[in-house]
Amino acid sequence: MFLIDLVSKIILLVLPLLIAVAYMTLAERKVMAAMQRRKGPNVVGIFGLLQPLADGLKLLVKETILPSSANLVIFISAPILTFLLALLSWCVVPFGEGMVYSDVNVGVLYTLAISSLGVYGIITSGWASNSKYAFLGALRSAAQMVSYEVSIGLILINVLLCAGSLNFSEIVMAQQTIWFAFPLFPALVMFYISILAETNRAPFDLPEAEAELVAGYNVEYSAMGFALFFLGEYANMILMCSLTTLLFLGGWLPPFNIAILYWVPASVWFGLKTTILLFWLVWVRSSFPRYRYDQLMRLGWKILLPLSLAWVFLVSGILISFDWLP
């Protein structure tokens, strides 16, 4: 009975996530098409709604090509590792009060640890491909992710100081009076820029720079290997926007403390905020050109890192001075 209950909980968590990832790709293509004054996918199904299923089926039935000079064990394991790590992070994400798979007291640390491990899937995929282009793309991606994780960690300290807890549910409940987005607005902006770089999204999609690296660390992958990297990337995008919602935008809490707004299910508020943040990701991709690699590193180490560190000193100083520490 315990095993059946465990499997059902995992399916209830993973299946909606995979559907969300599939239709996030369709939404991205539709929004970018509208911004560029073209139609986008509109052939497979009504308004192109079956396009993600057709793309998934195409990748599923394609032939898996294994490079003759690749280290096959690591080559095959890398996309599986990346995809599994993208799913594991969701265990501690609450969608509403009590709506969480595992409500651990160190949820923030757990999420940071799992996101840090994602570097291994990328670096091993580039190395195991035995291709200089894939390896260069993997090194770029690993350096980028490690660089911006430092800023993310410092920004999170501000939220933890204000909430007094590492538990996501308690962080959300600490925002009942005011969302942390208002007093910590500069931290929110820095966090959003950092998650763009952490998820390798434009304008920081340097690992996938077609002009000089062909396609990055996944250039040698095809069929389901490529699909797993793709699913992992989009699952991480949705995860990072969900974390932004929990840490800064009050999670499942309504925007105003009005009784009628509490009639709307908590998960609807959570989903709406996350969707708006995902829309901004697509908007940024459509609007900004790609950074050069030296500009990317300068932004991370010379701008975001000092600013986030200074913001920690400022916030902690204010909290101690006015005796506001929780």
Image: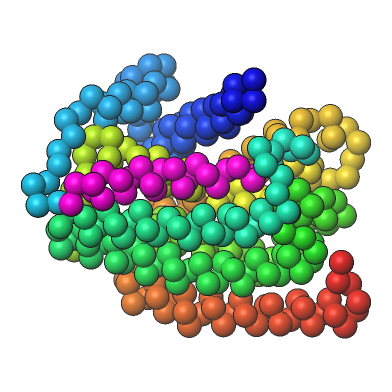
Q: Is residue 134 in the magenta section?
A: no
Query: Relative to the observer, which residue lies in front, 110 or 174?
Result: 110
Tell me, yes or no, if residue 230 can be seen here: no
* Rendering coords of residue 31 (x, y %): 45, 39
Residue 201 in which image quadrant: bottom left
The residue under the point 89% across, 72% down is 324
Query: Relative to the observer, which residue lies in front, 22 or 77?
Result: 77
The correct choice, above or below, for 301 with respect to 262 in the image is below
Magenta region: 71-93
* Rendering coords of residue 102 (x, y %): 67, 42
The correct choice, above or below, for 42 with respect to 96 in the image is above
Q: In the rendered view, does 133 fall on the left or right side of 252?
A: left
Query: Relative to the observer, which residue lies in front, 283 or 201?
Result: 201
- Farthest left residue? 68
Q: Is residue 83 in the magenta section?
A: yes
Q: In the rendered view, does 252 fall on the left or right side of 63?
A: right
Tell me the quarter of the image containing the N terminus: top right
* Rendering coords of residue 46 (x, y %): 41, 16
Residue 131 in which image quadrant: bottom left
The correct choice, above or below, for 70 with respect to 139 in the image is above
